[in-house]
Image: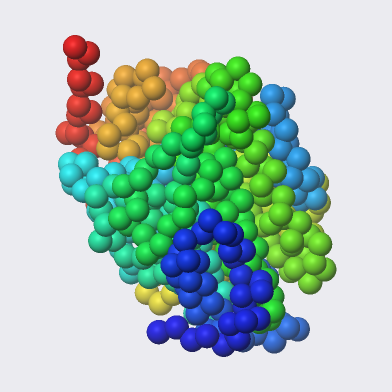
Amino acid sequence: MMRNDIPLRQWRANAVRPRSDWPATFVVLLLVVVAGSIGRGRSCNAAETPPNIVLVFIDDMGWGDFSSFGNDDAVTPNIDRLAAEGIRFEQFYVNSPICSPSRVAISTGQYPQRWRITSYLNNRKSNQERGMAQWLDPKAPMLARSLSQAGYATGHFGKWHMGGQRDVNDAPPITDYGFDASLTNFEGMGPKLLPLTLKPGDKQPGRIWDRAESLGEGYRWMLRSEITSGFVDAAVSFIDQAAAAEKPFYINLWPDDVHSPYWPPVETWGDGSMRRLYLSVLESMDKQFGALFDRIRNDESLRNNTLILICSDNGPQPGAGEAGPFRGYKTHLYEGGVRSPLVAWGPKILKKQNHVDSTSVFAAIDLVPTLLELTGTPRPEGVNFDGEALVGTLLGEGGSRAAPIFFRRPPDRDTFYGEDDLPDLAVRSGKWKLLCEYDGSDPQLYNLETDRSEKSNVASQHTEVVATLTEKLIRWHESMPADNGATYRNKPKRPKR
Ligand SMILES: [Ca+2]
């Protein structure tokens, strides 16, 4: 049931800017989805309004890709400005080296294995072959739902990829997961923006992912290089409405950028190499974020009471992004696959400015209980989070999570990006990182204090550490629902005729 507490005329003035090429049905649907949402829940007294939260979750970006994390090949001034005014966390992890499970972890505060989302969600047959669920169970403890129940306006703008893609067209809509409003891409249910492609010399744009038309209750084709602006515009309109209604807001801004294929603005095409195209997409994304960051910064009440968090869902694709000093790529359990830059901004919320936290070890699963505590929101009943509430850490006081961070590779990624027989399991515990096979064999042990690039395997010199961590890791692995990682074999590519 939707209630519309905001007069439509007033709403429309600030709504997602309808453009002449938007199909009328799509605009109406989007207006209904968003407009119905904001009046719900209890309203909060302005004096005690809990902080607004914006979670920017970039796709496939390396640890070293922001200028503020050492990238000399591109500039990301909008993000770097937030970093300079806020905190850069250098030892933050996501809980999977690939899209869908990483998204589940940051949304639920639990290991994604619990929900049998252990690799990217693909078509129905492929999900089944890998021993995975078809979509995230809507009963999962979503941060968005807890905040919504506490009176927040909640919106998801951008890539979802937790259900509803390819031929899986019966997944729940995003609004079943605690979001009042949504606008997504080709990997989610509900209103969506679909990508038109254009390269130098093209007279007409092409289309990719056109099958996703069957997933949506309204879609709009938009130049791929401008889609992030489409999500930003929707998020800004949502903020305008929440602010007018004096409601706190929680927003996911989860761009398609900087995932391949790379379709930057044609004028930034350069030599057309993968690296050049990638860097142009990265810079273009940063530019498009500007409108959102400025909306918050230029409004005193929002500036004083909004926390912005920016990170990446997994490591980079080789030849595109870079993981800084770290080994490995997307899909690997080495640091390059799972360590993400994290920028936190909130000038009146954080206790430090222009601060680098290079020591606190924590993970995406920790953000959910941390944000619940920070906002004074009750935890959902009967839920055990794998994450820990680390409010002090997030605000700049330092401190690592108490428990180790455990990882299991995607079932279809034993061999990838030129590496054969990749480690199946990994654990970060204190200064140690251990990687091994499902049965504990072939241990690799790295001291991340002295060897953060995981170059020197010291397993044979620290057999007790190996034994202790292996035992904990396998106990964790066996406590999680299984997938088909031990038996799944990637199909050989069809030989060329
Ligand atoms: Ca990804």
Of 324 and 321, nearer the camera is 321
Q: Position of residue 184 (x, y in %)?
A: 46, 56
Residue furthest out toward the top: 497
Of 211 and 134, nearer the camera is 211
Viewed as shown, does residue 292 lie left or right of 337?
A: right
Which of the 4 image quadrants contains residue 63?
Answer: top right
- The image's colouring method is rainbow
Vertical order, 143 against 55 (above or below): below
Residue at image location 32% in from the left, 57% down from the top: 215
Q: Quadrant of ligand 1?
A: top left
Residue at image location 23% in from the left, 21% down from the top: 493
Of 384 and 182, nearer the camera is 182
Residue at image location 30% in from the left, 55% down from the top: 214
Quadrant where the N terminus sits is: bottom left
* Number of callouts: 0
User: Quick check: can you spot residue 412?
Assistant: yes
Vertical order, 374 against 127 (above or below): below
Viewed as shown, does residue 77 lie left or right of 53?
A: right
User: Quick check: can you spot residue 59?
Assistant: no
Q: Position of residue 282 (x, y in %)?
A: 62, 35
Quadrant where the C terminus sits is: top left
Viewed as shown, does residue 380 lie left or right of 487?
A: right
Q: Position of residue 301 (x, y in %)?
A: 79, 72
Of 416 and 123, nearer the camera is 123
Residue at image location 27% in from the left, 37% down from the top: 411
Q: Position of residue 296 (x, y in %)?
A: 74, 62
